[in-house]
């Protein structure tokens, strides 16, 4: 099968759209279902209405094809696990009893059954549920969801293109199931999986799908010859099927490298490629591979991950070059628009000058349509759009908002000596032990405590003017008092103030730093029903005044036990924001680090002896290609040390990381030179503790023993088991006991029970150690 369209009629499309709705309707419906306030039929009706609304918006904007299958109640990789029948054995009974409840059990776990592991989707801040596979895995096709969505779109008179996670990426993302040998390679199941994809493709064709997109973003990473051979075989086999739709293989987030010729030669009808950022290298590589004669190319020339307006003339030049490399060229965003907010037009609080620089999902869709129109009819057909775009780009380039000479001069003056602690870790550890007087296996939490409805109401009332600052601060002080009292009674050793005043670990700081912009409606899905509003980094960064000192100092005044100061690190401040694209990331990170250095110094000067600078994004921002990683890790670790390097030896610096693959960056974790690191480990059964041990990590570590992303309360045996496992990798003198992550999203009843269990388990194991006391 080959496309009969010509390059003279470029089509506009996207690979996916924000799922949650204009006002996060999906989040509210799903959470209502979990709490019993919304029944299954009502939840399904909300989901169907959201799909209808999104498809209609895309069609009204001028898209020729709309994505289907990208919608999800929780996660599209979990949806793929259901589609191919790879339900873990421990969840099969729940799925058989009720498919929807079983689906959420895989995502969140139950009191008796652990959920699937969660980690980051490539180098984004989106989390997916990791498939668990083994040599005994039996796949079986279940295309009901995908078929239903195709039929829904067709019933609206639209042209749907199902977008599925491809078979090679699905297997490369998978891990050996519990009890399976750690060296099991899920990709060895490819021949078993391909017939299932063949069945799904046949079902989608029968439902009326003309094209299906199989996304293979794992192929933009460094891949072995065996993995590339597997990809070649997969698409040769799928391409040779007779009962299938036309196939489009998609990739994004980086350049394809050696995988591009493999995909270009595959017997499929088209490729969907990213041509933004580092993936711009795909242009020359495609030409070197001989192009795509007789095939369709969907060109991702609008950045689907950032929020700056597209340079339409530059994109048109790229598209013009591509016209000679394929039978037809269509226009798209570089990846799913899941990674950006819905509509910049709703941001009425932003300066109109700045608003014209921004492009969210709806604006990006319009850019795609404009580019397709220009490619089809010529630039004369979009003269007004091009003129407006040139003015928007010029406005941003000339704006004084983007440059602060004093900030730039300070960053340029930093010397390497300023990024290092004055003493070695062994000297610091001795000083900190003497100063803090902590027991073996000290207990702590990661920082945040539950954000109750009362706290959210108080913040909303303050914003709306229903209460004054004094009343709001009285509520915050009362909450801190309750959190401190609970931690003391529970027996935790190093306390936190609970962060009741913080809306988000990045946004809270961004709102107090120059150069950042905050949105009111810029919600983006992080995982499941967890949505965040990434701030926008528009200009140079500085700290006008202390940000955390007041409440940290107040909390310390309530207890003789040490209270951690809590900050978000420079890399995470960038990774969980929409960053500027007009300067190097390392330069921006240095500016943020200097602002944080000022804050760290003020915390220490006001009596804070333990300061945690969280860097959960250090791994997720790691470039996908190994060749690009050393330069990134140099500036990323330097920025952390710059933020923390000015404190006294007896001030203990902590950092925290969660929900990522840490094995690739253990050396960088060491290079941060933090005194203590806490990491997610409960779902991965202490894997990271062994990775640290294998590296010879010399500092203190707290691999998590309580999975906070599940509502289940661990029992004491479970936690003591994890602790004993951790002790086989990390000596007792350097092992901390803590949850995987912050407790913001959990409810107070489960937090109380879980932390009391955590302390009990720590005391039990502590008593088993030489010199230990309960």
Image (cartoon, rainbow, N blue to C red):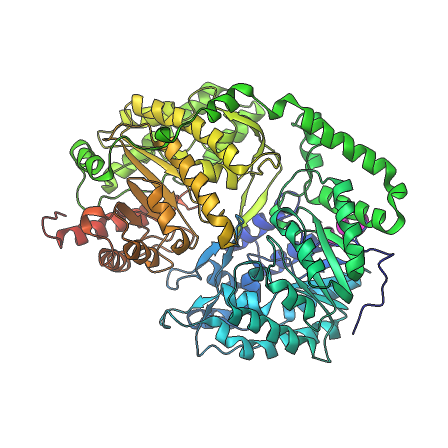
Is residue 372 left or right of 282 when viewed as pictured?
right
**Residue at the image point whose x is 44% and y is 53% from the top:** 660
Residue 495, magenta (yes or no): no
| Percent x, y of residue 659 | 43, 52
Would you place residue 236 above or below residue 722 in this image? below
Residue 57, magenta (yes or no): yes
Q: Most extreme residue toward the left, as rendered?
A: 771
Q: Is residue 749 among the parts visible in the rendering? A: no
| Percent x, y of residue 695 | 30, 54
Q: Is residue 100 among the parts visible in the rendering? A: yes
Is residue 472 left or right of 422 when viewed as pictured?
right
**Residue at the image point whose x is 22% and y is 41% from the top:** 491
The span picked out in magenta is 52-61
| Percent x, y of residue 247 | 71, 69
SS majority, magenta: helix
Would you place residue 435 above or below residue 43 in this image? above
Q: Quadrant of residue 183?
A: bottom left
**Residue at the image point whose x is 51% and y is 57% from the top:** 128
Q: Nearer the viewer, residue 251 or 481?
A: 251
């Amino acid at each position: 099968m080959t496309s009969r369209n010509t390059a003279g009629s470029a089509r506009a499309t996207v690979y996916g759209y924000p799922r949650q709705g204009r006002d996060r309707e999906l989040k509210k419906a799903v959470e209502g279902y979990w709490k019993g306030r919304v029944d299954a039929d009502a939840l399904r009706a909300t989901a169907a209405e959201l799909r209808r609304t999104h498809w209609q918006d895309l069609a009204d904007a001028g898209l020729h094809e709309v994505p289907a299958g990208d919608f999800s109640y929780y996660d599209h990789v979990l949806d793929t696990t259901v589609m191919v029948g790879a339900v873990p054995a421990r969840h099969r009974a729940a799925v058989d009893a009720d498919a929807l409840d079983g689906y959420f059990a895989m995502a969140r776990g139950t009191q008796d059954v652990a959920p699937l592991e969660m980690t980051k989707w490539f180098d984004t801040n989106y989390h997916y549920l990791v498939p668990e596979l083994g040599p005994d895995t039996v796949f079986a096709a279940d295309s009901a969801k995908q078929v239903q969505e195709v039929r829904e779109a067709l019933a609206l008179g639209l042209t749907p293109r199902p977008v599925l996670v491809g078979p090679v990426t699905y297997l490369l993302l998978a891990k050996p199931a519990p009890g399976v040998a750690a060296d099991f390679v899920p990709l060895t199941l490819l021949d078993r999986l391909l017939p299932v994809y063949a069945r799904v493709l046949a079902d989608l064709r029968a439902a009326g799908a003309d094209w299906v997109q199989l996304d293979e973003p794992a192929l933009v990473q460094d891949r072995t010859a065996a993995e590339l051979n597997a990809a070649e075989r997969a698409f040769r086999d799928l391409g040779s099927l007779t009962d299938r739709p036309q196939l489009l293989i998609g990739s994004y987030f980086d350049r394809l490298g050696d995988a591009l010729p493999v995909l270009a030669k595959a017997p499929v009808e088209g490729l969907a490629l990213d041509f933004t950022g580092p993936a711009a290298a795909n242009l020359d590589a495609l030409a070197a591979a001989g192009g795509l004669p007789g095939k369709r190319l969907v060109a991702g020339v609008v950045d689907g991950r950032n929020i700056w307006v597209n340079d339409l003339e530059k994109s048109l030049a790229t598209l013009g070059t591509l016209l000679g490399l394929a039978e037809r060229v269509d226009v798209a965003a570089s990846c799913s628009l899941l990674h950006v907010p819905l509509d910049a037009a709703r941001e009425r609080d932003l300066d109109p000058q700045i608003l014209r620089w921004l492009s969210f999902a709806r604006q990006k869709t319009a850019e795609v349509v404009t580019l397709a129109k220009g490619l089809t009819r010529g630039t004369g057909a979009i003269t007004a759009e091009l003129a407006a775009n040139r003015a928007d780009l010029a406005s941003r380039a000339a704006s004084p908002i983007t440059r602060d000479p004093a900030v730039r001069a300070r960053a340029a003056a930093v010397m390497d000596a300023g990024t290092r602690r004055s003493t070695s870790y062994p000297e610091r550890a001795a000083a900190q032990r003497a100063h803090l007087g902590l027991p073996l296996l000290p207990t702590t939490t990661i920082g945040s405590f539950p954000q109750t409805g009362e706290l959210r109401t108080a913040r909303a009332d303050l914003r709306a003017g229903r209460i004054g600052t004094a009343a709001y601060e009285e509520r915050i002080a009362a909450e801190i008092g309750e959190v401190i009292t609970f931690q003391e009674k529970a027996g935790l050793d190093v306390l936190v103030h609970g962060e009741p005043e913080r809306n988000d670990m990045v946004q809270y700081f961004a709102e107090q730093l120059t150069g950042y912009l905050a949105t009111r409606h810029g919600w983006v899905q992080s995982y499941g029903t967890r949505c965040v509003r990434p701030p926008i980094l528009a200009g140079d960064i500085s700290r006008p005044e202390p940000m955390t000192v007041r409440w940290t100092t107040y909390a310390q005044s309530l207890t003789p036990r040490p209270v951690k100061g809590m900050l978000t690190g420079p890399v995470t401040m960038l990774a969980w924001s929409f960053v500027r694209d007009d300067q190097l990331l390392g330069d921006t990170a240095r500016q943020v680090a200097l602002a944080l250095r000022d804050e760290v110094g003020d915390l220490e000067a006001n009596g804070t002896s333990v300061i945690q600078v969280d860097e959960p994004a250090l791994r997720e921002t790691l470039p996908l290609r190994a060749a690009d990683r050393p330069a990134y890790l140099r500036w990323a670790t330097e920025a952390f040390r710059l933020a923390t390097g000015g404190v006294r030896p007896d001030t203990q610096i902590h950092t925290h990381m969660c929900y990522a693959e840490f094995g690739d960056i253990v050396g960088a974790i060491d290079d941060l030179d933090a005194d203590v690191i806490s990491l997610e480990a409960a779902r991965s059964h202490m894997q990271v503790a062994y990775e640290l041990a294998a590296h010879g990590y010399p500092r203190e570590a707290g691999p998590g023993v309580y999975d906070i992303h599940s509502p289940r309360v661990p029992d004491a045996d479970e936690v003591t088991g994890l602790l004993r496992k951790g002790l086989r990798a990390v000596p007792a003198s350097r092992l901390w006991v803590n949850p995987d992550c912050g407790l913001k999203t959990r409810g107070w009843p489960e937090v109380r029970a879980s932390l009391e269990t955590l302390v009990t388990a720590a005391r039990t194991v502590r008593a088993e150690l030489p010199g230990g006391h309960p």
